[in-house]
Amino acid sequence: MAEHIRIGDVAPRVHYVADGAQTAFVFPFPIFEEADLEVRVDGLVTQEGFLIQGAGASEGGLVTFRQPPAAGRQVLLRRVLVMQRVTDFQPNGVLRANTLNDELDRQTAGLQELREDLQAALRAAPGDAPATLTLPSREGRANRLLAFDSLGNATAVAREPVLFAPFAGAIARTVEDKLGERLSVRDFGAAGDGVTDDGPALQAAMNAAAASGKVLEIGEGSHRTTSPLTLPGAAAGLVMRGSILYAGPGGGAALTIGDGAATRNQGKSYQGLRVLRASLSDWLDERDIGIVLRNLDACSVSIARVEGFTIGIRTLGVELGFEDSTIHLGRIVNNRIGLDIRTATAEAWNNSVRYIGGHFANSAATHPSMDRFGVRFSCEAGAYNRHNAHLFLGPGFELQRGGGDTGYPQRGAIPFLLEAGDERGIQAVGVRMEQCSRYVARHAGGANDCCYEVNYVGNYAFEGCAVHYPATATRAGGTVIARHQAAAAQGSPRLVADAGHVRGRAFRWSNDEIGFEGMACLSGNPAGPPSTLDGFAFPGLPDIVLNGDSVGLPTSRALGFVVDAAACKEFFVAVEGERLRIVVQQFDAGGEVILQDRPVLFSNMNVVGRFPGSAEASNAHWWEGNANIDSLVTSGGASLPLNRLQRVTLHADAAWAVIGVRGAAEGTQPTAVLKALRLYCSALHAPGILYGGSRRWGVRELQARLDFDPTEIPAGGNATQVVPLPFVQGGDVVQASHTAASGFIEWSAATTTTGQGGSVTCRATNRHGSLAINLAAGTLFVRATKPRI
């Protein structure tokens, strides 16, 4: 086997005409590296979609396309070397034959390329007499024709006829120049009759627009094509008054606008785009796309109609990203995904785009068993996933969820699907939902700061327009403003519970336990552990510290409100304090604690589960934030206090929940400080706060009653009765009274036993000096009040 390439007398270029089936094309000349080979299709450089084999072989190699070029397309393979020295022979150094041969091979290959280029150039014959063939100056040849004088020297002559536009300062031009200002597909043979295959003519026109940097016009009519089309980014723009009817195979985009890093698709205008599929897609292959807009920056796009594809429109950031553009949307019909906002690489992005209008619709009979979505945010594996600052103005969705009176089974029909993973600041204003699912959006990852303002919902038997969080969601980052429901009430949230001064709610529950009015105490490691709400919510706990104006919470203690979550699943928590973490505990309708398979979500931080057997193993059975409420969030070099107001989104199975805070020890400050805790929800709900009554937490006052008929009490004598009063303690203020009235009977009470089996002894004393009194039978009431501390 030879140790270096042999450069034979072989032209460094080869041409083919594709037949629509052939994928492998031979190049008979050697190349040193794959980058030395240039591949062109219809005169345009192609940088992807093929594999090169044979670099370093003397006999050449093979180019294999993933998809065969369409029939009639011109395929050119040629060697293009970078003209540079790759070796340097050192004085008195060893001159190796291989190194010298490689250098001479490169020089020979370069000379072959130069010879090929010269053969294609305009030049004088070898036997011709010397002549001056230098072009006249730019000013001397502008708007003139190249000619030769009587001696054969190059010169410029006037063009005839010329055209003067009727405006001051107009430049004289030929009629051909004037007609060529804007290219038309008709100039390349497109019929627009809906029958003729206009694909080759359309592509030739698009290539010409790119080569000349002009706007391409697709006039009235239906332009049928059996091959995908690409308008390179070098074209100045596109205007469509007719439509493209795609009748080609699936697995590709019918129309791609823009290309890769070689041409920045910036400041272009694409107007009136209409792309229809000749037959409805089966919705299974996501490569079946109507329009791909690639790497656009500060462009204006108007899409009139896209119909019948798996994905109607895809905006795609690949090499340089997609940004700062305005897209006017028309009818996006019978596509499984109407608009796919996507990135393909980690270096690209898809940010800061405005979308105006858009009617995303499906017919009731279109793939009735399949889910469908209006707008999707997505990315390829490992690609940029923080799509941000997308604004939608007045989109309408009529996606046909089925069910109701249609006779079809109900399916997912959701306007917005966020599955890239970390979307930020997606805003939709004036949304219209007709025959959609009950969700305006589905957040499948960690999307943040997204807001959907819904102006109208016309579902079958209206069910709502919430945000759906599947099991993969890590943030509750979506807010829905339902303008169609009591719009005047949407201006401010409803205050559900207010502990503006938590310290002022403290009372002595027992000798070593502190309770708080209206609030439940939670333990980070309850004995047992319990399994129900009544077991987890304590009326008081030890180790809580009372400061002058605040409450100190260790890491093992939490305070919160017990809320009725049967209807309302979203709450807002506002906290004032230091070194605190938000905690949430969920219970089902039977009061059983909900385990870690049904998580809680927060709006601006991730959650940590403290359950037996979890990574943060604990008997607490609660979810908590992964950061303190006073931790600063760093963004763009600035530190911002974003955690003090958090939205809590409960699982759909939650019927009751405890929402509050626990202590989070840090450094030399072992005890957190809680000053105020407030709970809000949407104005559409008025959930209850659970304490007292049949529950033992959150109340200072204990009460009991007993049927009691005392015997006759002699003058100066008394009668006693012990009344069970669980959890009464010594130091509680106890009182007794009886329904039978007497001016001389005085009732008093004293704590007899304490704790869960506590009791109070009631005494009736006859203060009459000489008369015995026999009270009528009645009810004996006992009350014990826990003292404030």
Image (spheres, grey):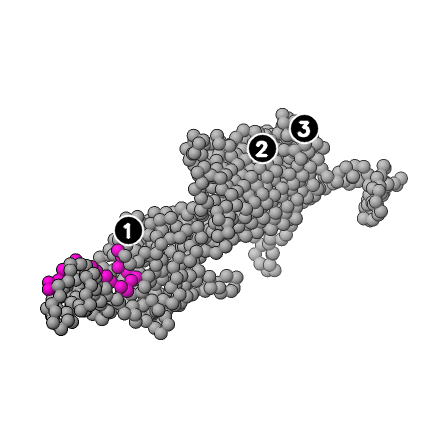
Which residues, given as a range, are shown in magenta? 694-712
The answer to which of marks 2 and 1 sits earlier in the sequence is 2
Identity of the amino acid at label 2?
Leu
Mark 2 residue element? strand
Residue matched to label 1 = 591
The answer to which of marks 2 and 3 sits earlier in the sequence is 3
Q: Is residue 200 above or below residue 107?
A: above
Q: Is residue 1 left or right of residue 631?
A: right
- Which x, y percent locates residue 101? 59, 48
Residue matched to label 2 = 276
Residue at screen point 43% across, 62% down? 644
- Which x, y percent locates residue 518? 33, 61
Mark 2 and mark 1 residues within 8 Å of each other at the beta carbon:
no
Q: How far apart in space, not on screen, are marks 2 and 1 (Cα)?
A: 55 Å
Let me know if residue 139 appears in the view: yes
Which quarter of the rendering shows the C terminus? Answer: bottom left
Q: Is residue 125 left or right of residue 78?
A: right
Let me know if residue 452 appears in the view: no
Please state which of residues 215 and 718 is positioned toward the viewer in this rendering: 718
- Which x, y percent locates residue 216? 68, 38
Q: Is residue 713 above or below residue 453?
A: below
**Most extreme residue toward the front, as rendered?**
770
Q: How far apart in space, not on screen, are marks 2 and 3 (Cα)?
A: 17 Å
Q: Which mark is residue 191?
A: 3
